[in-house]
Amino acid sequence: MKEWISGDTATGVVMKRRKQRLEDNCPRCKEPHEHLLHVLVCKDSNTGAFRKGEEEEFQIWLQKENIEPNLERFLTLGLQSWIDDPMGREPEYVVHSQKWEKAVTTQVNLGWYAFLCGFVVAKPLIDIQHDHYLELQLKKKAERWAIKLIHKSWNIMYQLWTQRNTALHETDAIHENSGVALLKAAIMREYELGKNNLPRVYSQNFTQTLENILEKSVTQQKQWFLVIRSGKEGMILDSFSDEDALRHWIGLTPR
């Protein structure tokens, strides 16, 4: 959570800025400039279905905690509306009292992104939930409920981040963002140039066909290219000569 709030989480934008990724596209919807907000509201259909499950689980948890019904509506409707359109208008909420007006106005002013980061207007919400527990004659502590609410909001964010990372690391997305298309083009060029100007020890790398090399895993393609390019450093000028993100990905020493 500390890294998330500081803005140093490894989103596409951050990894490109660090020169550890060539592209900053979202691994799920492929939209460029993936930032923290996009991680939470990405419009990819699979992400939408996953997020819907998280929203439903959140509502079930609220009900199990005997939440005040209007408070449940406020939290679920507000969060869902913001996820659907972060720049859209806030839904209209029924304000029952001055206490309610303070709770709604303050939380809305903080924003739903802040809510997911754990910035909850504790005192007004606690007062409402406390009164509800008294009406139900329950001995539950509203303060404890508020703490669990913050943890629950953090978990929603964590689950969405985990789902995003699965899409990045368990598909070809990380290779696409790292420069796999440029790698294949560079391999074809190196193979066409052949072993000219390379010591005899490199000959074994050209015994397989180009088609076989390109059919191998991205990791194996990177290894083949790293060996060949290491023997030709300074002899060929292309994207792998001066692009630090590509060099980092391949394993070449940054310029």
Image: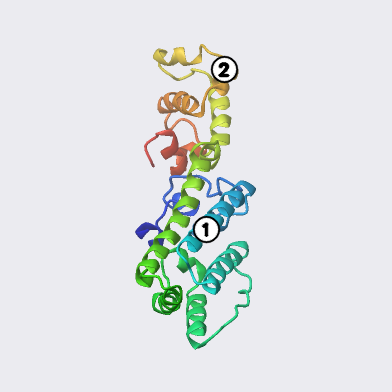
Rounded to the nearest whole Å, what is the CA distance between mark 1 and mark 2? 53 Å
Q: Is residue 141 above or below residue 234?
A: below
Q: In screen coordinates, is 85 left or right of 71?
A: right
Residue at figure coordinates x 45%, y 20% from the top left:
197
Foreground mark, 1 or 2, reads 1
Residue at figure coordinates x 51%, y 79% from the top left:
104
Residue 58 is situated, as x and y percent measured from the top left of the image, at 51, 58
Q: Secondary structure at mark 1?
A: helix
Q: In screen coordinates, is 118 left or right of 48?
A: left
Q: Relative to the observer, which residue lies in front, 229 or 211?
A: 211
Quadrant for the N terminus, please.
Answer: bottom left
The residue that label 2 is drawn on is 212
Q: Relative to the observer, which residue lies in front, 129 or 12?
A: 129
Residue 91 is situated, as x and y percent measured from the top left of the image, at 62, 74
Q: How is the image coloured?
A: rainbow
Q: Secondary structure at mark 2?
A: helix
Q: Is residue 186 above or below residue 57?
A: above
The residue that label 1 is drawn on is 60
Q: Earlier in the sequence, mark 1 or mark 2?
A: 1
For badge 1, the amino acid type reads: Ile
For badge 2, the amino acid type reads: Asn
Quadrant for the C terminus, please.
Answer: top left
Q: Are marks 1 and 2 in contact (CB under 8 Å)?
A: no
The label number, if any, that marks residue 247 in the structure image: none
Residue at figure coordinates x 62%, y 62% from the top left:
84
Residue 87 is situated, as x and y percent measured from the top left of the image, at 61, 69
